[in-house]
């Protein structure tokens, strides 16, 4: 079964409040075995529409696990802190073997 990834593009309007999301989501990522491959580092937009200033790629063992993490009560509670202080787009995508 191929690994899966969260690919997130986010613009944060209030970094201090956004920390509540980051701290709250951390236990869900640990529980579901998430591995951060990229997390808000330097980036270059080279083609297409700019999707946000912060880009995150998170690896999971499979698509089912990635979706379960997103749907988890822990993540959804943390997400409530993210929504008022940022805009973003998250895609769950299956990798190739």
Image (tube, rainbow, N blue to C red):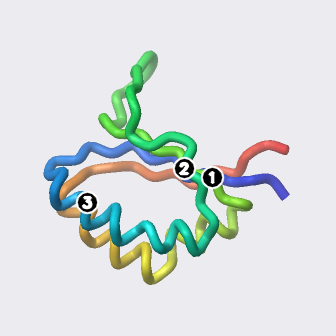
Residue 28 sits above or below residue 94 on the image = below
Residue 78 figure quarter: bottom left
How crowded pointer 2 is (Cα within 10 Å; few <14, some 14-19, many 20+) is rated as some
Residue depicted at x 37% and y 27%: 49
Does residue 27 appear left or right of residue 67 in this picture?
A: left
Q: In the displayed image of the protein, which residue is found farthest to the bottom? A: 73
Q: Quadrant of the C terminus?
A: top right
Q: CA distance from mark 2 to mark 3?
A: 17 Å
* Image coords of residue 26 (percent x, y): 44, 67
Give the mark, 3 or 1, whose residue is nearer the N terminus.
Answer: 3
Task: Name the foreground residue: 7 vs 30.
Answer: 30
Does residue 54 appear left or right of residue 2 in this picture?
A: left
Q: Are marks 2 and 3 in contact (CB under 8 Å)?
A: no
Q: Are marks 3 and 1 in contact (CB under 8 Å)?
A: no
* Residue labelled with disc 2: 36
* Residue labelled with disc 3: 19
Residue 23 figure quarter: bottom left
Residue 22 sits above or below residue 48 on the image = below
Residue depicted at x 47% and y 73%: 27
Residue depicted at x 50% and y 79%: 72
Residue 76 sits above or below residue 63 on the image = below
Give the mark, 1 or 2, whose residue is nearer the N terminus.
Answer: 2
Of labels 3 and 1, the one closer to you = 3
Q: Are marks 1 and 2 in contact (CB under 8 Å)?
A: yes
Where disc 2 sits, the SS reads strand
* Residue labelled with disc 1: 59
């Amino acid at each position: 079964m191929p690994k899966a990834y969260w690919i997130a593009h986010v613009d944060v309007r209030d970094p201090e409040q956004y920390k509540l999301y980051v701290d709250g989501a951390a236990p869900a990522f640990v529980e579901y075995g998430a591995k951060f491959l990229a997390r808000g580092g330097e980036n270059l937009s080279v083609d297409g529409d700019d999707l946000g200033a912060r880009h995150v790629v998170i690896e999971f063992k499979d698509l089912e696990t990635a979706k379960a993490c997103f749907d988890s009560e822990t993540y959804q509670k943390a997400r409530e802190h993210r929504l008022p202080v940022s805009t973003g787009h998250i895609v769950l995508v299956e990798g190739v073997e």
